[in-house]
Amino acid sequence: MQRRNFLKKTGLGATGLASIPFLSSWSKPIGEIQPKTIKKAVRPIVVCTWNFHNATSKAWEILNSGGNALDAVEQGVMIEEADVTNQTVGKGGRPDRDGNVTLDACIMNKDGNCGSVVYLQNITHAISVARKVMEDTPHVMLAGKGAEQFAYEKGFEKENLLTEQSKKEWLEWKKESKYETIINIENHDTIGMLAIDANGDISGSCTTSGMAYKVGGRVGDSPLVGAGLFIDNEVGGATATGVGEEVVKTVGSFLIVELMRQGKSPQEACEEAVNRIVSKNKNYNDFQVGFLAINKNGETGAYCIHPGFSYSKYDGAGQSDNPSGSFVKK
Ligand code: SD4
């Protein structure tokens, strides 16, 4: 029923509506709806996908000493980009099926500005290149050779990102060249990070080497603003990990932020986004997607398709690992 007809049928005009406390908020445009109970906001706070303690520790160090959320989410994920034992992010990342390590990353700040790099080679800190795109160019996204050239102009050093370990595993994989997604194992350790600083401002970052042994040229959700990451400083932020193709199809992170804007908690919003993916994919048993969200109050939520996803949190109460609920139960 259209809202106007509903009002007619129930005999509730504008004055009638305003006199009912519950409905008076409903009569406001969606963006103006206030949370039902005003809780004291948790800040500063940082969360990231998976249990990357060193990353949340670094971000917390910045936030706790009065630093801003943008610096925190950049420097936090840089820890993983530099860690060669993390084979899904930055240096040491697993290559595509031709043996090339190609990185995707994006960053978004409190003003809704963003920067992104896709198919970036030979540079460890893709997130910092993304930040430079945001701050030093009139553009949002740079790809491939152009992104790499831009990075050198900004003083980034050329490095070989393919470690002996990743090369050895790739050569092993090549014997069969079987391209399949593996739930929660190996190829799902992308780091997406969301932070709120002491001023209450929100920023986010997301960086990855993408799906292991992907087709050369493939770009996933992680550098796509709205899919792998989205921030709205009035509402909150969301980020994703898992099979990027499915996240792109539902514009997952944007969806979650919009659901929070409509009054859903971060947990409810993540669950709805996962439910949407599951309802559109009969083969959801074959892949994993996990979402993480935070609202302006510092409340957090996470949800995934298959058990195994978790997130790391650091706030005034300390650091914690938080297992995510899942659509498929254990
Ligand atoms: C991608 N979402 O490229 C990324 C992969 C991922 O942990 O999350 N890995 O599709």
Image (cartoon, grey):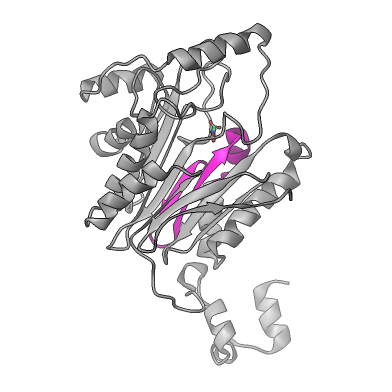
The spot of residue 73 in percent (x, y) is: 34, 45
What residue is shown at x 47% (from left), y 64% (from top)? 299
Magenta stretch bounds? 227-252
The spot of residue 239 in percent (x, y) is: 49, 46
Residue 169 appears in which quarter of the rendering? top right
What residue is shown at x 59% (from left), y 52% (from top)? 324
- Numbered-mark total: 0
Residue 173 appears in which quarter of the rendering? top right
Q: Is residue 323 magenta?
A: no
Indicate whether 139 appears above or below 325.
above
What residue is shown at x 43% (from left), y 22% (from top)? 92
Dividing the image into 4 quarters, which one contains the N terminus? bottom right
Q: Is residue 229 magenta?
A: yes
The spot of residue 149 in percent (x, y) is: 29, 18
The spot of residue 172 in percent (x, y) is: 60, 10
Indicate whether 94 appears above or below 83.
above
